[in-house]
Image (spheres, rainbow, N blue to C red):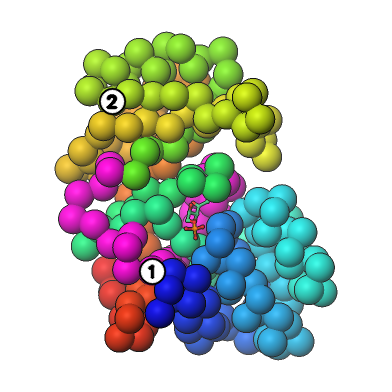
Amino acid sequence: MNQDELKALVGQAALQYVVPGQIVGVGTGSTVNKFIEALASMKDQIKGAVSSSEASTARLKALGIPVFDSNEVAELAVYIDGADEINGQGHMVKGGGAALTREKIVAAQSKVFVCIADESKLVSVLGAFPLPVEVIPMSSARIMAQFAQMGGQAQVRLKDGQPLATDNGQYILDVKGLQIKDPVAFEAQVSQWPGVVTVGVFAYQKAHVCLLGTSAGVKTLKF
Ligand code: 5RP
């Protein structure tokens, strides 16, 4: 099976976690796009979705799935999202699709985080994937220097030669060269640097379950 097929497999498998009659939290990315396609088959059984990005919102609406503002919903039973990396404790690196801030917000209002990923995403130590960090533009140089002191090399993410603007109008730094051995401490430390909106380490909002697409089928990891 190729990567695309593995993503479709876990996107479909995630339907078992969607609670009929409720609103489901929906992440962002190519794996989640497969989940959204699969969710269309259940659209008459759910109230709708809270979305983590403009891109997912557009896809949900195009399929006729109502999208609620996160402020309208006190708690979600489940949040389904992908990851750029996940370790054996359910800690993740996220933000490859620049949606990390809203992803963390929706994850925080959800009781259960179900990560859907192909097997290439499972790692022992987080950090090989360049770490996305959403920052206020005027703080980017200082934050890049702080990462350099940790041994990381940060770059502003570009689109068409210009800094990419997130859905929240901020910048993304991608930080290479980190080995994140203590994700909980790392997330706590970087989150309090002035100008950091969201660090792409999800240790506080970690996955409870990971549906991992492998050539032998879907493997369920519980954390
Ligand atoms: C978007 C994310 C995605 O979940 C992550 O980048 C994985 O994406 P994909 O399923 O396309 O590999 O965090 O901000």
Q: Tell me if 119 is positioned left or right of 65 in this view.
A: left
At mark 2, the secondary structure is loop
- The residue lying toward the viewer, choosing from 116 and 176, is 176
Which residue, given by chain and number where applicable, does mark 2 sit on?
Answer: 152
- The residue lying toward the viewer, choosing from 205 and 63, is 63
Q: Is residue 110 magenta?
A: yes
Q: Amino acid at mark 2?
A: Gly
Q: Is residue 178 magenta?
A: no
Residue 97: tell me if it is visible: yes
Spatial CA distance of label 2 from label 1 is 26 Å
Residue 174: percent from left, percent from top:
43, 32
Callout 2: CB less than 8 Å from ligand 1: no
Q: Tell me if 103 is positioned left or right of 57 in this view.
A: left
Q: Residue at x 39, y 24 (%)?
A: 154
Which quarter shows the C terminus?
Answer: bottom left
Magenta stretch: give its range. Answer: 99-128
Q: Which image quarter: residue 152?
A: top left
Which disc number belongs to residue 139? none
Which residue, given by chain and number where applicable, does mark 1 sit on?
Answer: 118
Q: Which image quarter: residue 206?
A: bottom left
* Number of marks: 2
Q: Residue at x 48, y 46 (%)?
A: 96
Residue 93: percent from left, percent from top:
37, 48
Residue 203: percent from left, percent from top:
33, 50
Q: Tell me if 99 is positioned left or right of 200 in this view.
A: right
- Is tag 2's residue or tag 1's residue first in the polypeptide sequence? 1
Q: Residue at x 35, y 73 (%)?
A: 212
Callout 1: CB less than 8 Å from ligand 1: yes
At mark 1, the secondary structure is strand
